[in-house]
Structures are given as C-alpha cells and as structure tokens.
Amino acid sequence: MAEIKSHEFDAFVKRRPMPVRLLLVYGPDRGLVSERAVALAAASGVALDDPFSVIKLDAGDVAQDAGRLIDEMNAIGLFGGDRLVWVRGAANEKGLCDAFQHLAGMPPGPSTLIVEAGDLKKGAALRKLAESTPQAVAIPCYADDSRALQSLIDQELAAAGLRISPAARERLTETIGGDRLASRNELQKLALYCRGREVVEEADVEEIVGDASAISTDDAVDAVLRGDREGFLHAIQKIVSSRTPVFLVLQGCLRQFQLLELMRAEMDEKRMPAAQALATLGRHLHFRRKPVVENALRTWTGPAIRRETQRLQAAILQSRQRPALEDTIAMQTLLATVLQSGRKSS
C-alpha cells in the first residue's frame, strides 16, 4: 500500500475495517515501535486475551522456518473468527522476507500479520516489500520530534488533571524524547509525583525525571568513556528501575564512538588538539559532557576507536538477531568497553 507517516498513524489505526492485513512497524525508537504495534493489535478486532486467536512468534523462528508463518496466517481458528499473528524482533531476515512476499501475493484472508522490526535501511528487503505491496503498509517509528514530544507531554499530564509551567516544559523536553516508551513512563511517574496539585514546576521535573531516561543514558555512556565501572553500574541500575531499555545505552555508546572516530580523524589529519576538534564537531553536546569526551579523545587512538565501534555494531546486530538475550549482550559488551576505557585512562 504505502508508508504511513507519523502524523497519519492515528487516523490510520481508527479505520474500520483495517485496509490491509500485513503491517510492518519498524524504526530506531523501540518504545514507539512497541506502542504502535499494540495499538494495531487492538484495532485488528481480534480478542487479544484469546490464546487460540493470537499467535506470537520470534523472528528467529520464522527465519529458520518461513513456512511456519505462512501456515499460521492460513490456519483457521479453533472457534472460527479472525486471527492475529505477531512477529517480534525482526531484522530483515531472508526467511521472513520470503514469507512476507508470499503472503503479499495471496488474497487477503482472516488473519492479520504485525511484524515489529528494528531500524531498517531504505533499501532493506522487508521494508521495500511493505512499502511497495498493495496488501501491506510500512509504519516507521523515529524518535519524537519537538511537536510530537509536546503532544505527548500534554496528553499524559492532561489525563492526570495537570498543567505544566513553561520552565518545567523546557526542562522536561531536554530530559526525555529518546524512546517513546521510556518518555511515557517518565511522564506517568511525574504525574504521580504531582498528584493533587494543579501545576508541574521545574523543580518537580528535576526531582523526579532528572535521574532517568535520556539523562541517565548519557550518564551510563559517560561512565563507559571514563572507564568508571561503579558509576556505570549505578547508572544502569537507575535505567533499569525506570524501565528504560538497556539497549538504548548500547545504541548511545555506538553513536558516541562514531562521533569520537570522526573527531579523532580530524585531529590526526589536521594535527589539532582534542579541545579544537570538540569545539568544531561537538557543539551539540551538553556542556557537562564535553570534558568526558575531550578526555576520551586524548586517551583513545584512531585504530582503537574503530575496533570498539565495530564491536559495538556487532553487538547491536547480535541483539537484534537474538532478542531474548538483548539485555545480556548489551551488558557484556558495555562492561567490556568500560574495562577497555579504564585501561587506557590508567
């Protein structure tokens, strides 16, 4: 059918009946992917509490046996009625793509397919199939822009009967936004903290939201760069308690090392000091993080940064291929990077 843009999703999910039966939800914002998949499942008309009507599969299972997905989509429910087949953890596996293509060529049946995937590139086969097939739609999920984030803040606080001061809104906008699910959790926590009041103030945001979400993710990444094992474990504990996915730290760490690689190459090519490279390429960094990044530029060589970047990329790929082990893979990889940083700083 096409790609459903972010601003079109709410209208799309309200259409009855749904215009297509094959739905691909993908993107780097894993919380938003999950949230939209749940909304689509609810809109499918299938009783989600009926185990005979809802079949949940791991993408790895489908990759090894593409025929299983086709069989599940063509199966008739024990008591009749529509069925929902829900595939999670997809990453453009060939078996899944083959099954999706086969289903796209068949007449619509009584089953709805929802596939949750990670960040698929423009030419990825699974994304291309969903965008170009009349029987399917692709629904990208990117990090909330300013407009979407403001809407989310208003929605959650209004539901709790709260208003928010301009200063508090600005502070909150700086703190959340990297992941929809984590952002919503933080807003609900803030609303609970301010229960019985009318207005959320800046101090409330700093007290409750300041320890989690994007800020705690940065804290964990900075601890990795410093080689601070205790600081890293403390930051991870706060992230887990706020129900923010540990994967976001792994992703943030990769982005940081990619930036380090770019800065280090600039330093080596133009023989400039770390502070100058940081001033040129790190203007968007928060001022509190700049000393940590500058020190990392001094201690990490270009080849070492490239090796670490490749290892982080491999860990992200592995976590997508084995979603059940995602947290374990992320923690092992991050701890190894902490130890590497510690050795270089000593």
Image (cartoon, helix red, strand yellow):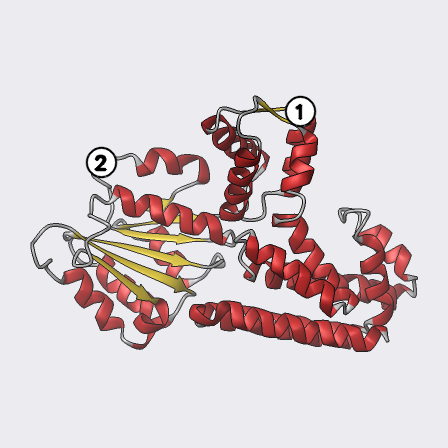
Find residue 340 and report its image quarter.
bottom right
Q: Is mark 2 on a helix, strand or loop?
A: loop
- Percent from the top left, x then y, of residue 247? 55, 62
- Percent from the top left, x then y, of residue 316? 55, 68
Provide the residue designation for mark 2: 16
Q: Residues within 10 Å of mark 2 (few under 14, many from 20)?
A: few
- Which residue type carries mark 1? Pro
Q: How far is the residue under mark 1 from the one under mark 2? A: 39 Å
Q: Which of 87 and 336 is in front in this view?
A: 336
From the viewer's perspective, is residue 178 above or below residue 168?
Answer: below
83 displayed left or right of 118: left
Which residue is painted at 59% across and 70% down in the image?
331
Find residue 224 and report its image quarter.
bottom right
191 displayed left or right of 36: right
- Mark sitting earlier along the chain (1/2): 2
302 displayed left or right of 53: right
From this viewpoint, which residue is outermost toward the front? 196
- Percent from the top left, x then y, of residue 191? 53, 34
The answer to whether residue 255 is visible is: no
Provide the residue designation for mark 1: 166
Q: Is mark 1 on a helix, strand or loop?
A: helix
145 displayed left or right of 109: right
- Which residue type carries mark 2? Arg
From this viewpoint, which residue is outermost toward the left? 79
Find residue 55 and report its image quarter.
bottom left
The answer to whether residue 26 is visible is: yes
Mark number, residue 187: none
Q: Nearer the viewer, residue 318 or 263?
A: 318
Image quarter in which the C terminus is found: bottom right
- Percent from the top left, x then y, of residue 72? 19, 64
